[in-house]
Image (spheres, rainbow, N blue to C red):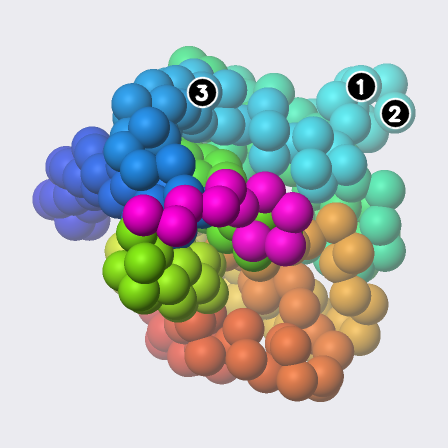
């Protein structure tokens, strides 16, 4: 178990630096293609490098705040949620672990996630629905799972990916809108200019898909390892297995979740059966919940 955790931590650190470097290169290429497509030549390359570098640093140091903000999370107070804080404190002391900040989302869908760049700058967030659905043992299983994500440095990687994926989606949408009102008339380019515009459109369409594939750099194995680490911490795998069963059958949809943050949650927050959700499931970073429960039950 210790060897697996150390391997995961090492892999997550490597993936973090790789994704940050890839994002800078990716946005620079986007700036080059889209700048030419809009008739500005190479003028956008330097701004793209500066923008991508700044946003990479922002995602590293303040990505957790961004996630809490877009999720509508509010900092919890011990007086309002005594059981929640009691379980977090108990697990933190049991594992000799820095106690994370605690947040809540006022929605009925039971779910939870953790974020932060390292154990000393970490947060756990749960929904009101989770607190109302689970008993103390099941809540302990979920929180142990989230603490394991923090310990394994999954949270740093996930926070960075969430922010960068969101930025790419916004960038793509902005370019498509710019085609209608912002393109300069550059007649010197002739047919080449039209080709660049077409390439830019294709690039803008594919960019969100590419960004989603970057999300998949976060292996599904991280969920299995967090399940196992959490079960090891509580010494009761059945706690988390029971919690996952209850969360998975709940019909509420978490409105605060988005495609950029869905991979953070302990269970996929999209539960309606519409086409958008079906398509997003093709890129799901979570392993089948039935398989997770089966493994936990066999421990």
Q: Position of residue 185 (x, y in %)?
A: 48, 46
Query: Which is more toward the observer, 273 or 166?
Result: 166
Image-based side of 248 in relation to 289, left or right: right
Q: N-terminal of the two: label 3 or label 2?
A: 3
Q: Which mark identifies residue 134?
A: none
Q: Is residue 41 magenta?
A: no
- In this view of the protein, can residue 93 be seen by the observer? no
Name the element at disc 2.
Answer: loop
Q: Position of residue 141 (x, y in %)?
A: 55, 50
Badge 1 is on which residue?
77
| Mark 3 → mark 1, Cα distance in angstroms | 27 Å
Q: Which mark identifies residue 80?
A: 2
Query: Which is more toward the observer, 56 or 273?
Result: 56
| Mark 2 → mark 1, Cα distance in angstroms | 5 Å
Image-based side of 256 in relation to 166, left or right: right
Q: Nearer the viewer, mark 3 or mark 1?
A: 3
Badge 3 is on which residue?
58
Q: Position of residue 149 (x, y in %)?
A: 40, 41
Tell me, yes or no, whether the two marked residues, 2 and 1, touch with CB atoms within 8 Å. yes
């Amino acid at each position: 178990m210790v060897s697996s955790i150390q391997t995961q931590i090492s892999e997550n650190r490597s993936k973090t630096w790789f994704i940050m470097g890839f994002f800078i290169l990716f946005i620079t290429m986007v700036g080059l293609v889209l700048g030419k497509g809009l008739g500005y030549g190479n003028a956008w390359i330097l701004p793209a490098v500066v923008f991508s570098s700044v946003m990479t640093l922002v995602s590293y140091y303040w990505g957790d705040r961004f996630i809490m903000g877009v999720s509508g999370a509010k900092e919890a107070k011990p007086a309002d949620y005594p059981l929640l804080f009691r379980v977090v404190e108990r697990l933190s002391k049991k594992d000799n672990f820095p106690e994370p900040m605690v947040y809540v989302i006022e929605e009925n869908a039971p779910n939870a996630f953790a974020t932060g760049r390292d154990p000393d700058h970490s947060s756990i967030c749960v929904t009101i629905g989770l607190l109302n659905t689970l008993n103390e043992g099941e809540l302990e299983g979920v929180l142990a799972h989230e603490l394991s994500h923090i310990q394994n440095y999954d949270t740093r990687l996930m926070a960075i990916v969430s922010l960068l994926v969101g930025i790419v989606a916004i960038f793509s949408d902005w370019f498509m809108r710019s085609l209608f009102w912002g393109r300069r008339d550059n007649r010197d380019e002739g047919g080449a200019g039209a080709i660049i515009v077409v390439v830019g459109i294709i690039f803008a369409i594919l960019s969100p898909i590419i960004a989603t594939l970057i999300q998949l750099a976060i292996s599904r194995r991280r969920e299995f390892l967090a399940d196992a680490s959490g079960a090891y911490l509580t010494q009761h795998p059945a706690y988390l297995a029971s919690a996952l069963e209850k969360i998975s059958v709940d019909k509420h949809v978490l409105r605060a979740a988005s495609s950029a943050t869905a991979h953070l949650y302990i269970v996929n927050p999209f539960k309606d059966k519409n086409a958008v959700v079906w398509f997003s499931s093709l890129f799901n970073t979570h392993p089948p919940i039935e398989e997770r429960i089966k493994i936990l039950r066999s421990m």
